[in-house]
Image (cartoon, rainbow, N blue to C red):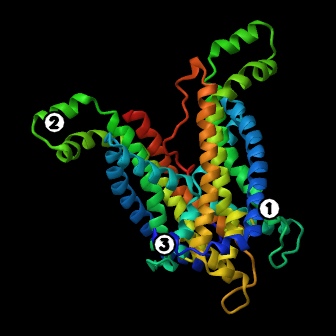
């Protein structure tokens, strides 16, 4: 039985009960929004109409090209000052930045998946009287979704890891919570104990992320081998 | 577009020195980290491809740990955690002993991170070299070492190059994340400090985005060019993967 030091309990409790739920919230919001926006944009990208294709291509290249932190600073610091005056709380700003980035990734994957469906499927659906929307929603996308599954699991892994950038704008997610606890312990009593435990705390955070991320990474690899 | 029209461009011109020194710092740390990541990737990639006992297993664990943990936590662990442990060895635990400068910590994080992904890139590249090439080398009397240096490395490296340059672009983008995290004054950190002084966030971050996109898009175009030039007829199956890889994208 390991004899845990007395400071470890409250630190772990704060990280798991205050930090982890916010990380889950940001990750869930971003993954759901990225999937929806990305699948719509990726499907529209397969239409052979130059202006719409150029616009979506620009969207993909911009949000994939920018470092995530630049996108985050733009949504959190720049948008409130522009003429629009949009102001977001840190977790919303982080979710928006992750969604812009994630939807660009999903759109690119969706385009490939939709184009991999044979022509005959389009023609057969059209012959049955489906319009463009019905054809894609009921015939093409359900088949393309099989191919989308591995990239979507990879996206989930990346989004969970990248939620940590929210700590840079003050969100108390897992890393933000760990940082605040590390600073608290280093401070004087009564809150702190004037000890530095950065190694244990950030090492623990790495273990936590590894425990979440490793099974998902294996799942993504497994799906890729099974479905392609 | 009236957002752009309301921009005060003079703010950017007045602070051009900040952007300039940040830009060079970003290039400096990225270029030196990319060099280190190549060395790590080639050495560990070769050990993985040739299934060297122990080294290969350790390399596999290293790769899994790095790609399954956020780079930001890795940076915090290296910058704040390592000095604590090293100071324990010297017997005194002073308040925040800084043994790593922000530059060293940022460089080390990027090398460790990029090295893990390059290990995978070069492993795939070396494994894609047809077995008979190596057998031919051995039959001609090349030692194992000479076979690797003269056959596997040039051909496998050529196969791995596009995807490893992709990793290099990610290293450069990741430096933007580490700067604000550990107060290392690269481009993003400089832009952030300009913003806190001038309160002109739209102009500052718009300029920042333009700079990063210029660099990243130029490098991406270069990758596509290289990919076309370097393609080997026998190596079609290892194509540059544009799909999302766990842990890689930032």
Disc 3 with disc 1 on a shared chain:
yes
Mark count: 3
Q: Which mark is residue A125?
A: 2
Q: Secondary structure at mark 1?
A: helix
**Residue A146, relative to residue B133: is it above or below?**
below
Give the alpha-carbon distance from disc 3 to disc 1, as whole Å.
36 Å
In the image, what residue occupies the spot 69% across and 75% down? B194
Q: Choose top left, top right, bottom left or bottom right for residue A78.
A: bottom right
Q: Seen from this angle, which residue lies furthest left? A: A129
Q: Are marks 3 and 1 in contact (CB under 8 Å)?
A: no
Residue at mark 1: B103
Q: Secondary structure at mark 3?
A: helix
In the image, what residue occupies the spot 83% across and 68% down? B88
Q: Residues within 10 Å of mark 1 (few under 14, many from 20)?
A: many
**Residue A146: x %, y % from top left:** 32, 40
**Residue B132: x %, y % from top left:** 64, 12
Give the chain letter at badge 3. B
Give the alpha-carbon distance from disc 2 to disc 3, as whole Å.
45 Å
Q: Nearer the viewer, residue A137 or A54?
A: A54
Residue A37 visible to an observer of this rendering: yes
Question: From the viewer's perspective, is B169 left or right of B34?
Answer: left
Q: Secondary structure at mark 2?
A: helix
**Residue A214: x %, y % from top left:** 52, 50
Classify the position of the N terminus of chain B by image quarter.
bottom left
């Amino acid at each position: 039985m390991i004899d845990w030091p007395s400071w470890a309990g409250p630190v772990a409790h704060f990280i798991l009960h205050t930090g982890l739920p916010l990380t889950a919230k940001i990750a869930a919001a971003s993954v759901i929004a990225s999937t929806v926006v990305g699948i719509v944009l990726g499907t529209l990208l397969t239409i052979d109409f130059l202006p719409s294709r150029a616009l979506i291509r620009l969207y993909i290249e911009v949000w994939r090209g920018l470092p995530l932190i630049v996108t985050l600073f733009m949504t959190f610091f720049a948008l409130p000052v522009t003429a629009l005056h949009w102001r977001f709380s840190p977790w919303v700003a982080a979710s928006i930045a992750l969604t812009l980035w994630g939807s660009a990734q999903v759109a690119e994957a969706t385009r490939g998946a939709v184009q991999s469906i044979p022509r005959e499927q389009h023609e057969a659906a059209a012959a049955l009287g489906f319009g463009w929307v019905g054809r894609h929603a009921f015939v093409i996308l359900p088949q393309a979704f099989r191919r989308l599954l591995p990239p979507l699991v990879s996206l989930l892994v990346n989004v969970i890891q990248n939620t940590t950038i929210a700590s840079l704008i003050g969100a108390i997610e897992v890393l933000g919570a760990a940082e605040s606890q590390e600073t608290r312990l280093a401070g004087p009593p009564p809150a702190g104990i004037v000890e530095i435990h950065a190694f244990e705390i950030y090492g623990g955070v790495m273990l936590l992320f590894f425990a979440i991320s490793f099974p998902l990474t294996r799942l993504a690899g497994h799906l890729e081998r099974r479905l392609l | 577009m009236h957002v752009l029209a309301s921009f005060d461009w003079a703010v950017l011109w007045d602070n051009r020195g900040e952007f300039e020194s940040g830009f060079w710092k970003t290039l400096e740390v990225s270029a030196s980290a990319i060099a280190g990541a190549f060395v790590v990737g080639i050495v560990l990639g070769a050990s993985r491809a040739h299934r060297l006992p122990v080294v290969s297993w350790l390399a596999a664990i290293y790769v899994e740990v790095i790609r399954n943990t956020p780079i930001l936590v890795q940076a915090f662990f290296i910058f704040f955690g390592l000095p604590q442990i090293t100071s324990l060895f010297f017997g005194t635990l002073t308040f925040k002993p800084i043994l790593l400068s922000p530059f060293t910590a940022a460089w080390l994080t990027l090398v460790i991170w990029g090295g893990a992904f390059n290990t995978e890139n070069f492993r795939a590249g070396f494994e894609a070299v047809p077995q008979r090439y190596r057998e031919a080398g051995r039959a001609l009397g090349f030692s194992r070492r000479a076979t690797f240096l003269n056959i596997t490395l040039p051909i496998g490296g050529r196969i791995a190059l596009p995807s490893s340059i992709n990793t290099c672009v990610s290293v450069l983008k990741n430096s933007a994340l580490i700067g604000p995290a550990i107060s290392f004054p690269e481009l993003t950190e400089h832009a952030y400090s300009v913003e806190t002084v001038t309160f002109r966030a739209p102009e500052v971050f718009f300029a920042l985005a333009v700079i990063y996109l210029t660099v990243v898009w130029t490098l991406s175009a270069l990758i596509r060019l290289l990919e076309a030039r370097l393609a080997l007829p026998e190596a079609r199956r290892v194509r540059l993967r544009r799909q999302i890889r766990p842990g890689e994208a930032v």
